[in-house]
Amino acid sequence: RTVFRWLSGESRWPQARLRRALETVTGVAARDLGFVPRGHHSTEAEHDQETPMLRRTLITGIAAAAAPLAGTRHSVGSADVIRLRNGLDTLMAADDAQGGSTTLERAALAGARDGLALQQRGATDRVRLRLFSLAANYTATAAWSCIDARRLDQAEEHLKVALQLAGMAKDSEAAMRVWNSTAMLAHQRGRHTGAVAAAQAAQSTTACRRDPLYASLAHARTAVSHANRRARQPALRSLGQAGEALGKAHGEARPSWIAFYGPAELHALTAIVRDRLGDAAESEAASHRALSVLPVPFRRNRALATSRLALAQLHQGDIGQACATTEDAFRLMRGAPLPGRMRTLLGDFHRDLISTAPSTTEAREWADRHRTEWSRTA
């Protein structure tokens, strides 16, 4: 009954003994877990970002973390690895649906702390490496959440730690993931040469040499990085290599973090590359292809691809259709905070709309209806 009240939001501030227990289990203050003291109305953005899905994710993580801590000390083994992996999969599912947030970041960091604490309590070398790997991926998830929310300084710190943990785990897949995120972060900071270097570092990992799916993602990220520098031929060459590698990939078991990548995501990245190179018609076509094959659970990615489609239509001068397309993006994210990356993309749309057609009825109506909506954080 108590947990149900937490889930529903009926109980926003647990009793003192329960708060102490939660803080002991998670290592996070009650306020930072999303609870609000009685009579207190938080104004912090991270509390505003709480949603039912992320609250359920948090409670699930608390329950999973509490289980091994109850009773006597137990030996560390595969059951701990499975529990942590399941928790990571839950966080990735929440990210796929809603995008990055402070709550997701904190839940991921709590999972990383759990993994590191377990490896210190005695385990076989094999289990310890797996725990380091999970800690690396939890930390990379925290970094990705910050990238998606455009909290860049925090993302950079998390990526540094994640890369160290991936090295300690001898996990080239985790290292590839970190370099891929590092390339995205460099782009957000406007460091396009650094983005190319990071994407090429991802290509050089053992994971990319062994698995063409990872290689495809690394080549696609390199293509985006080249396109941001307006380097047409290198960008198109990398896109071709990404497509060739993806055609060789098989449906083998892989970590949940890369479940987003496949034909749909390659089309979406192609749309970005083409738009950055000034090929708006090709960008629109690629966005349509992405939306036609994008799996249903990836709501955030669908909203981003829809926004990218609207931008391509705008760049072809189709003002009315572009404005109408953004309606679908807002509808897709209704009831959830707009991730920082999507707010930035819609901000780009607004800027280009004003630049392209400042006096049109469509531009004025769009700004009047959506200026507040596209800039909201909750």
Image (cartoon, rainbow, N blue to C red):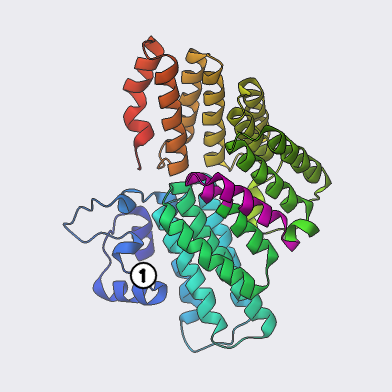
Q: Quadrant of residue 170?
A: bottom right
- Inspect this view and state whether residue 35 appears: yes
Residue pictured at 75% horizontal, 62% vertical: 206
Residue interval drawn in magenta: 183-206
Q: Given the image, on which type of amino acid does mark 1 rest?
A: Val
Magenta stretch contains residue 194: yes
Tell me the crowding category of disc 1: few under 14, some 14 to 19, or many 20 or more residues within 10 angstroms, Cα based.
some
Front residue of 185/170: it is 185
Q: Residue furthest left?
A: 39
User: In this figure, which residue is indicated by the disc labeled 1?
Assistant: 28
Residue pictured at 74% horizontal, 60% vertical: 207
Q: Is residue 164 left or right of residue 1?
A: right
Q: Is residue 349 left or right of residue 171?
A: left
Q: Main secondary structure of the magenta part?
A: helix
Q: Residue furthest top?
A: 360
Secondary-structure class at tag 1: loop
Q: Position of residue 190 (x, y in %)?
A: 49, 44
Q: Position of residue 227 (x, y in %)?
A: 62, 36
Front residue of 165/326: it is 165
Residue pictured at 57% horizontal, 53% vertical: 181
Q: Is residue 219 above or below residue 3?
A: above
Front residue of 347/260: it is 347
Magenta stretch contains residue 190: yes
Q: Position of residue 322 (x, y in %)?
A: 50, 19
Residue pictured at 35% horizontal, 42% vertical: 377
